[in-house]
Image: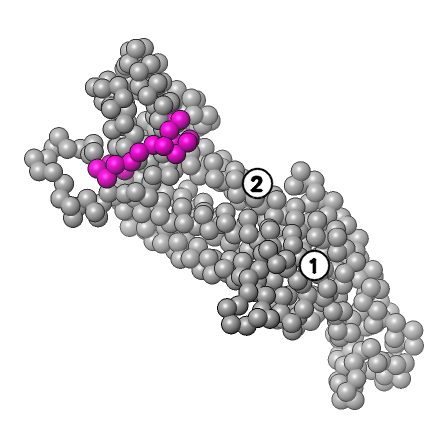
Amino acid sequence: MTLWSGRFDDAPSDVLWRYTASQTDRRLLAVDIRGSIAHVGMLADVGLISADEHAAIDTALHQLAADAADDTFEFLETDEDVHSAVERRVIELVGDVGRKLHTGRSRNDQIALDIRLYLLETSAIRRRQLTEFAGTLVELAQANADVIVPSYTHLQQAQAIPLAHHLLAYAWMAVRDRSRFESLDERMAVSPIGASASGGSSLPIDPYITAQRLGFPVVFPNSLDAVGSRDLVAEYVFCCTQTMVDMSRLSEELVLWATSEFDWATFGDAVTTGSSALPQKKNPDIAELARGKTAGAIGSLTSIMALQKALPLAYNRDLQEDKEHVFSVDDALGGTLEAITAMLASASFHPPRPSSWTMALDFAEVLVGRGVPFRRAHEAVGRLVSRLLADGRTLDDVNPDDLSAADELFESGDVALTDASESIRRRMSSGGGSFESVAQQIEALQRLLS
């Protein structure tokens, strides 16, 4: 069913139909019906349809809403899009009065409304998933509060830290990811319905009534912008993609930690896979797929940005393509959050102790505490490291003679600086990798996530 056939003598060709008709937007069925219910309510409020007409159309729309909820709504091949499918079915149910459903609106403001309603719903789901994901990391941090690992810079061991500090870094990323969705919600909660095709309507419609019925606190200020812009879709795709990038970073580490070379973590059998050829294998496929799906998300973000770059105001059919990208990225994020959370929940951690070299900075800082300029202290410890390496030794093997040869301000008791637990306990800087900082972070995250 087309909503524009009156202008044309010939029916759409098969070529036109195959290329232009969209099935991608069918997942918007429930929100399209919800928007239509609000719209016909407004039409009745302003007197554009009678109370009886409103009752008939409203009853039909609620029947469609029930069909959508139990997945029994039937789309036809002749439905050009979700909007025409809804209108077609309403007319089937109530006859000609159903043709008044589209009074005072266009598919241009209708789709702008639908996508906002849909993304507001999915945003709430993603925020709940991010809360669960971050909560799982916090629980793991609590359970492994005493486990010590090296931190890394340039993928080289840097300093000794609690494993919990490393896990909580990803929890803080998730909190920021969640906040981006929250912030976007404020900008999405602006009703575009009433903008019509581009310049509004000569009919006495009231966009504020429709917005109020839908729970939108704000109505569009400019009809061209309302129907011709998709920056909010792009922003939603960015929020998803940035979250996917954060998940991909974690996934890369989960893959490394599961290797025999790192041997930091083991994941449950129920969330890992095997090899068709190698009986010994246990593969962290969830994490690998998360990395792969992130590549697709980045591609979709690029596409949605390029889609907008040369569009004159207002609506252009190019914008039909936005849904393919936003749905794909959102689906990928939803599945990834669910799967990575389950994978993490199954983890047991057993990392080896960090190298004694991760205490090198402690040796420099003890000299700084005695008044030595940091650059001189750095050079002294560098000489100490070179001496030990030349002898095939590590900091675990350091003795008072090594220290005095490096700098006369070292004391014999400084050999104890190679204790990783003590290194962590000495940390005083706020937000650093100390046991006290980890406890403070866990408390702060628990408050935020509750």
Question: What residue sits right under mark 2 in the picture?
Answer: 128
Image disc number at residue 67: none
Question: In percent of the image, x 45 and y 47: which residue is there?
Answer: 330
User: Which residue, as the protein is rendered here, is positioned at the far bottom?
Assistant: 391
User: Which residue, as the protein is rendered here, is positioned at the far top?
Assistant: 51
Main secondary-structure element of the magenta-colored stretch: loop
User: Which residue, as the protein is rendered here, is positioned at the far right?
Assistant: 412
Residue 366 in view, yes or no: no
Q: Which residue type carries mark 1?
A: Ser
Q: Is residue 63 left or right of residue 314?
A: right
Secondary structure of residue under mark 2: helix
The residue segment tinted magenta is 65-81
Which quarter shows the C terminus?
top right
Question: In percent of the image, x 41 and y 42: which residue is there?
Answer: 232
Circle 2 crowding by C-alpha within 10 Å: few under 14, some 14–19, many from 20: some
Secondary structure of residue under mark 1: strand
Q: Is residue 295 left or right of residue 369?
A: left
Q: Which mark sits nearer the N-terminus, 1 or 2?
A: 2
Q: In the image shown, does 256 or 242 lie closer to the viewer?
A: 256
- Percent position of residue 100, x then y: 24, 20
- Percent position of residue 389, x then y: 75, 85
Residue 395 in view, yes or no: yes
Image disc number at residue 348: 1
Q: In the image shown, does 254 or 381 lie closer to the viewer?
A: 254
Question: In percent of the image, x 26 and y 19: which residue is there?
Answer: 94
Q: Which residue type carries mark 2?
A: Arg
- Percent position of residue 403, x then y: 86, 80
Res 53 quadrant in image:
top left
